[in-house]
Image (cartoon, rainbow, N blue to C red):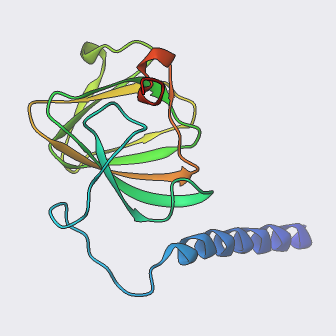
Amino acid sequence: MRIFLLAVIIVSFAGSALAQDKIDRMRAATMESFTPDTVKWNDEPILPKGAQSVVLVGDPTKAGVFIAWLKFPSNYPIPPHMHPFTEVITVLRGELGNGIGNTFDMEKGEMLKAGSSFVLPAGHPHYVWTTDEETIVELIATGPWDIMYINPGDDPRKKK
């Protein structure tokens, strides 16, 4: 029994060390601060027209953890969609509506104010929207990041 417990403890520490190593590899060479007014925002082609993004840490096109900010204009909807990996979203500025399901229905969602977060498991259909003000959220996820729209006609990558 002692050998089994010792093995469990060793495996637990090894798992923690491996997770820490992934975070360590994300680090920049020096300390860096970010503010929404000083970062370089880029159009985000994976989302409906109007969204902008900036990657702060990591690379969403590659395997591994990344952190990005997404900026949405006022009254902006993102149709029902899913992601391949779990995401953590934190509202930094404005308000973000979040609903679960295959049909966009703001009455069935919840409104999150600045400082609120939610965790979205991989493969769960959801949709989001903003109110009458610009909204900025922080996205922490695992790459490669993707979005699969429930209705393929909603995918802006297919409208080019």
Answer left or right for 135 relative to 146: left
Residue 9 lies, with reference to residue 43, above or below; the image says below
Residue 48 horizontal/vertical position (percent): 33, 30
Note whether residue 39 is visible: yes
Q: Number of numbered discs present?
A: 0
Residue visible at 68% across and 71% down in the picture: 18
Front in this rendered view, residue 70 or 42: 42
Residue 45 horizontal/vertical position (percent): 39, 39
Residue 62 horizontal/vertical position (percent): 60, 57
Residue at the outermost front position:
160
Front in this rendered view, residue 30 or 159: 159
Which quadrant of the rendered structure holds the N terminus? bottom right
Residue 21 lies, with reference to residue 128, above or below; the image says below
Which quadrant of the rendered structure holds the C terminus? top left
Answer left or right for 152 relative to 96: right
Front in this rendered view, residue 95 or 44: 44
User: Which image quadrant is residue 20 in?
Assistant: bottom right
Residue at the outermost left position:
132
Answer left or right for 156 relative to 150: left
Residue visible at 70% across and 74% down in the picture: 13
Residue at the outermost bottom position:
30
Residue visible at 14% across and 43% down in the picture: 94
Note whether residue 151 is visible: no
Residue visible at 48% across and 78% down in the picture: 27
Residue 130 horizontal/vertical position (percent): 20, 31
